[in-house]
Image: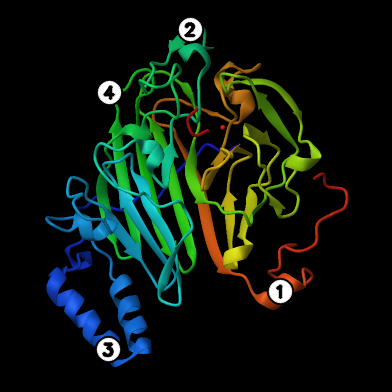
């Protein structure tokens, strides 16, 4: 675990880059243009849609509904990043969260993260496609912990939850510090917070077929405290979805979703190779993770590689839903109250002015038919052959 309290390169503070703002044509003229091209040639229509989709829509008057792909939701402004492979919509005022993350395929957009059905300032954050976790992940038992010779009280932050959950970032309004076609940097000043006072930065960047999220937190409080970071994506799920995320152990949760004991990962949950998601509810923190995982949608011939500089993940698989959550985090649930405290379980103790940085990447790839049929070929990721030794989350985790 590294504390990024050494020199961290910061971009100069600025407002939105005017050159990055894209003008939005009126709906009538835009629709007419696409219709005219469609009549001329299907191939030309696909090219026109791709060209239109790869021009981002930046926040501004009357653009929010266009950016989020919805009608009548002008109370939320989103930033759209786009390139030839990916489209990402970010809602700064909704916890800095993602409202859609799509892969481009033959001119169409396929969801990688679950899309928001409706985007509104009044929506539940758990309806987002992804949001940041800071300055801690998941629940804190009894809303308190002991650290540095004092009792630290952490207030509840959700009326529907008996315990504080996921920190403050996912419920806050973030500000856009800078943005261009393929990158946006958000900031959150929570210096007046109690007990956690901090300043945070969240950067989303598209690099080819990869989405890179960088989350940074600086302790602006007087007292040192254990900090932890993570992200909470809601991934698309169908009957063909498989997961590969090798981990050596996990914290079994009780009825209140707090960990009760640490055990070796059972064979059916070791995920050493791509394996179908459990049909039953799983809402546990897995330990001994390498920081690499893969999600496979065989029916869609699509795969997602996940990389993070963390040692844990939380897996949440609600039965009957069209999503599941794979949350890369640097500490287990209720780490501050486990034996040895948060510092012994992946969290980082930050003094005043010290910073912590975590990076999370999501790379989308179209599965090659021949590679899928032959798992020895590069890129096949063991999708077809499974080791014979393998055995057959209330709120989001």
Residue located farthest toward the bottom when viewing the structure as drawn = 40
Q: Identify the residue at image location x=63%, y=47%.
A: 291
Question: Which callout, 1 or 4, points to the residue nearer the camera?
Answer: 1
Which sits earlier in the primary sequence, circle 2 or circle 4? 2
- Look at discs 2 and 1 and give the one toward the viewer: 1
Label 2 SS: strand
Total tally of numbered discs in the picture: 4
Q: Residue furthest front?
A: 320
Query: For this rendering, which residue is in front, 150 or 295?
Result: 295
**SS at mark 4?**
loop
First in residue order: circle 3 vs circle 1: 3
The residue where tag 2 is placed is 150
Q: Which residue position is annotated with label 1? A: 371
Q: Nearer the viewer, residue 54 or 146?
A: 54
Task: Answer few, some or many: residues within 10 Å of disc 4's Cα (few below 14, many 20 plus, some between 14 and 19).
Answer: few
- Decide which of tag 3 and tag 4 comes sooner along the chain: 3
Describe residue 337's horizontal placement relative to residue 208 as left or right.
right
Q: Residue at point 32% right, 77% down?
A: 49
Q: Residue furthest top?
A: 150
From the image, tell me which residue sits under label 4.
192
The residue depicted at 28 percent of the width and 59 percent of the height is 69
Q: Quadrant of residue 183 in the image?
A: bottom left
Circle 2 packing at 10 Å, graded few (<14), some (14-19), many (20+), is: few
Distance from disc 3 to disc 2, alpha carbons, whole Å, reads 71 Å
The quadrant the N terminus occupies is: top right
Q: Which residue is mark 3?
A: 39
Q: Eyeballing the image, is 78 above or below 133?
A: below
């Amino acid at each position: 675990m590294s504390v990024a309290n050494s020199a961290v390169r910061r971009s100069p503070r600025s407002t939105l880059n005017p050159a990055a703002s894209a003008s939005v044509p009126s709906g009538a003229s835009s629709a007419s243009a696409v219709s005219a091209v469609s009549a001329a040639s299907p191939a030309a229509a696909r090219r026109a849609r791709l060209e239109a989709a790869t021009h981002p829509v930046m926040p501004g008057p009357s653009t929010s509904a266009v950016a989020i792909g919805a009608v009548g939701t002008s109370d939320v402004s989103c930033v759209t990043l786009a390139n030839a492979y990916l489209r990402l919509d970010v809602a700064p005022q909704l916890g800095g969260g993602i409202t859609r993350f799509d892969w481009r395929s033959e001119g169409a957009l396929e969801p990688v993260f679950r899309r928001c059905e409706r985007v509104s300032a009044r929506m539940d954050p758990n309806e987002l496609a992804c949001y940041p976790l800071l300055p801690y992940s998941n629940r804190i038992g009894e809303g308190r912990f002991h650290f540095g010779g004092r009792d630290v009280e952490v207030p509840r932050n959700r009326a529907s939850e008996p315990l504080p959950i996921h920190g403050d970032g996912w419920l806050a309004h973030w500000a856009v510090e800078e943005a261009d076609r393929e990158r946006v940097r958000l900031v959150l000043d929570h210096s007046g917070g109690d007990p956690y006072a901090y300043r945070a930065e969240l950067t989303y960047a598209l690099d080819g077929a990869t989405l890179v999220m960088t989350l940074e937190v600086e302790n602006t409080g007087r007292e040192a405290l254990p900090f932890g970071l993570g992200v909470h994506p809601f991934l698309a799920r169908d009957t063909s979805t498989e997961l590969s995320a090798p981990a050596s152990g996990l914290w079994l949760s009780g009825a209140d979703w707090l960990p009760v004991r640490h055990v070796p990962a059972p064979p059916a949950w070791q995920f050493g190779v791509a394996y179908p998601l459990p049909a039953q509810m799983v809402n546990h923190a897995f330990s001994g993770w390498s920081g690499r995982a893969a999600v496979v949608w065989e029916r869609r011939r699509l795969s997602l590689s996940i990389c993070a500089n963390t040692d844990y993940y939380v897996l949440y698989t609600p039965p009957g839903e069209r999503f599941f959550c794979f949350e890369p985090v640097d500490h287990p649930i209720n780490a501050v109250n486990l034996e040895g405290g948060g510092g012994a379980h992946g969290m980082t103790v930050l003094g005043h002015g010290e910073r912590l940085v975590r990076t999370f990447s999501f790379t989308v790839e179209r599965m090659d038919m021949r590679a899928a049929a032959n798992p020895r070929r590069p890129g096949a990721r063991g999708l077809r052959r499974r080791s014979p030794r393998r055995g057959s989350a209330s709120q989001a985790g």
